[in-house]
Structure formats: structure tokens, C-alpha cells
Amino acid sequence: MPITTCIATPAHIDACVRVLAEGFADDPVMSCIWPDQNRRHGALPRYFAASLRHFHLPGGGVQIATDQHGDLGGVAVWDPPGQWDQPFSRTLRALPALLPALRARTSAAIAVRRTLDDHHPLAPLHWYLANIATPASHRNQGYAARLVADRLAAAPDTAAYLVCTREKNIGFYQRFGFTVSATFNLPIGPKPPMWAMIREP
């Protein structure tokens, strides 16, 4: 099955949001922020829409993969080197869109964000894979692998970094040269383990 990848534009936001909300519906990080499943599933579309529009799309690193019919098979949210740490001014502008999604879970989201940031490497400059997801209809068909491989092939001399939220997925990233650089736990709820992974250039 042929797979086509390209850089996402604002016209792709709605489709990307659907894929990301589905893919992260039961993710350990999102489950810490929104322990209640119904609230989490209701909040994720707003959260991802605000995140893409205000933080990730402006950097030009969000990639999508489509099948031969043009249907979205995967989304990879990459932040370019030096752009993972969002400036306060951008966060301030995003608040009106983020707060309706977070509501009473704002403090939980801040605690999780601080923990992730505390373990984020400052050097070397790197591409940061913030999120990657495929819809159920396109899973296990190579879409996520193609998105990772394309980004790494386009920047062979630049490091890449991600946080793996499920132990079973470590092997997937190891196929692309990522190695576990640290392990840590989120600070709230069941405090699930996280695996920081880096791929050297």
C-alpha cells in the first residue's frame, strides 16, 4: 500500500486532531492529566487543536501520512531543533483555547509538563517527537514507521529525542536508532514510568 507523507498545514488541523485524540485516548500521560475517561475523551480534541494551532504547526514540523485514497493514516508532531521549549508569550496566547480543555485539571497538566521539561535534554540540538498516532483503521500498516523514518532521513546530522510512554513501544523506536537515555515517573496519579529516548546524529 503506497504511503505519501507531507508537512501539515492549518487545513489539516481537524483531521490531525481526530487521529491524535483517538491515538492518545488511553495514553498514560493523558490519563494522568484527565483520570476520568469520559472527561479525557471529551477534552482531547480541544487540547490537540489548541496545541497544534499555537505550538506545533508554526514550527513547520508536523507531518502527516496518507494512503492512496488521501485518507489520513498517521500524524507525527515534531518540533524543530531549538523550538521544543515554547516561549511564555505563545503559551499566554494559547490559554483561551487550552483552558476550556483543561479546566480543573490545569494544575495536573502543569505538573506533568514540568516533569517532562525537567528531563528534556538541552543539548545537542534535536528534533523532538512530541506526539505520533495512527487511527485504528490504519494501524500496523507502516504509517508511524514511515513518518519517523522520513524525518530522520531528512535530518541525518541532527539528533532526535522523544519520551516513550509505554514500555512495549521501546522496541519500535530502537529500530530507528533511539536508545533509552533515562527513566522517570510522572508526578501524579499512578505515577507511570516514562522512557526518555535519544537518537544521536
Image (spheres, grey):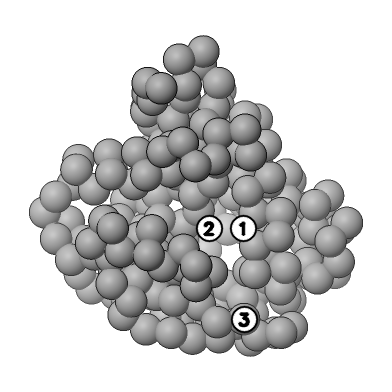
| Identity of the residue furthest to the top in this view | 69
What secondary structure is marked by label 3? loop
The residue carrying mark 1 is: 92
**Contact, mark 1 vs mark 2 (Cβ under 8 Å):** yes
Q: Nearer the viewer, residue 12 or 92?
A: 12
What secondary structure is marked by label 2? helix
Which kind of residue does numbered mark 3 sit on? Pro
Q: Give me the C-alpha separation between circle 1 and circle 2.
A: 5 Å
The residue carrying mark 3 is: 192
Say few, some or many: other residues with alpha carbon within 10 Å of mark 1 (under 14 / 14 to 19 / 20 or more): few
Tell which circle, 1 or 3, labels the residue nearer the N-terminal end: 1
Q: Give me the C-alpha separation between circle 3 and circle 2.
A: 31 Å
Residue drawn at 28 percent across, 44 percent down: 149
Which quadrant holds the N terminus?
Answer: top left
Q: Nearer the viewer, residue 163 or 137?
A: 137
What secondary structure is marked by label 1? helix
Q: Measuring from the top left, give residue 106's x and y in whole percent.
A: 75, 69
Q: Nearer the viewer, residue 56 or 87?
A: 56
Q: Give me the C-alpha separation between circle 1 and circle 3.
A: 29 Å
Instruction: Kindly identify which numbered label has been placed on residue 89.
Output: 2
Which quadrant holds the C terminus?
Answer: bottom left
Say few, some or many: other residues with alpha carbon within 10 Å of mark 2 (under 14 / 14 to 19 / 20 or more): few
